[in-house]
Image (tube, rainbow, N blue to C red):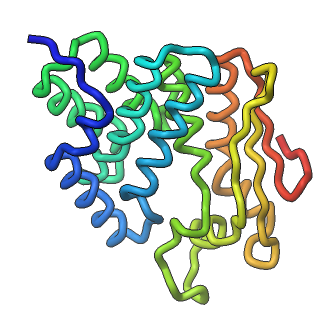
Amino acid sequence: MEQIVTFADIKKNAVIKTYILQADETLLKLGYTEHAFMHVMKTARKAGQLLLDFGYSERQAELARIAGYLHDIGNVVNRVDHAQSGALMAFRILDGLGMAADEVAVIIAAIGHHDEATAFPVSEVAAALILADKSDVRRSRVRNIDQTSFDIHDRVNFAVKQAQLNLSQDRGSLTLDMAIDTDICPVMDYFEIFLSRMILCRRAANFFKSSFRLVINGAVLL
């Protein structure tokens, strides 16, 4: 029997919490930035809000929130192909909860298309997830406390003093507006790591017939 599965249901699910925690623990050991509850909650809320801002229904926004919350659980298996393994895990969870097949399909397609190596905005939920996930750049994601041993990923995230994804009033443009401490990380280092992600964000914005702009320290770079 089909059930209306809500974001609240997903957040209180103990199994999902375990997978998120274990996935983040795996990434910690591999030296990656934070991918735990702060990241998945920020991604979920932003993905849902983007769809509401673009005029989609509350239920579509709810599916985006669920996709955002679940999108990184595949890291519990391996960082490599985590989007695909995460999609399969999400299928098992959501199907087990009785979610309608058409809604499960939307969510797992979004999760399976969120990693820049293989990603594509195949739906409004996938596009919103891409934009929400890739715009979560912040100092608090860095877990290495020894700045002398920072790699380029640590430097890029630690240098970010502020990052905000804003939709224009006419919905014609999405702007990722960032303030970066260039004494910690030159702007070129940011591009070395994030250019492919920003190109993906542009594709996702184009899905909504919107342009994508990257502004760093007041300068329009993309």
Q: Is residue 119 left or right of residue 215?
A: left
* Depth check, front residue: 191 or 13: 13
Of residue 14 and residue 188, the one placed in the foreground of this image is 14
Residue 5, quarter of the rendered image: top left
Q: Residue at x 80, y 62 (%)?
A: 187
Residue drawn at x 73%, y 38% is 166
Above or below 22: residue 175: above
Describe residue 112's horizontal placement relative to residue 58 as left or right.
left
Tell how many labels: 0
Residue 183 against residue 173 in the figure, above or below: below
* Residue 142: % across, % down: 52, 71
**Image quadrant assignment for residue 179:** bottom right
Residue under the point 71% across and 60% down = 162
> Is residue 64 shown left or right of residue 12?
right
Q: Quadrant of the C terminus?
A: top right
Q: What is the x, y in percent for residue 109? A: 37, 23
The quarter of the rendered structure image containing the N terminus is top left
State the image coordinates of residue 183 (x, y, percent, origin top left).
Answer: 80, 78
| 200 horizontally vs 17: left or right | right
Furthest toward the right, the residue is 219
> Percent from the top left, x then y, of residue 161?
71, 66
Q: Residue at x 55, y 85 (%)?
A: 149
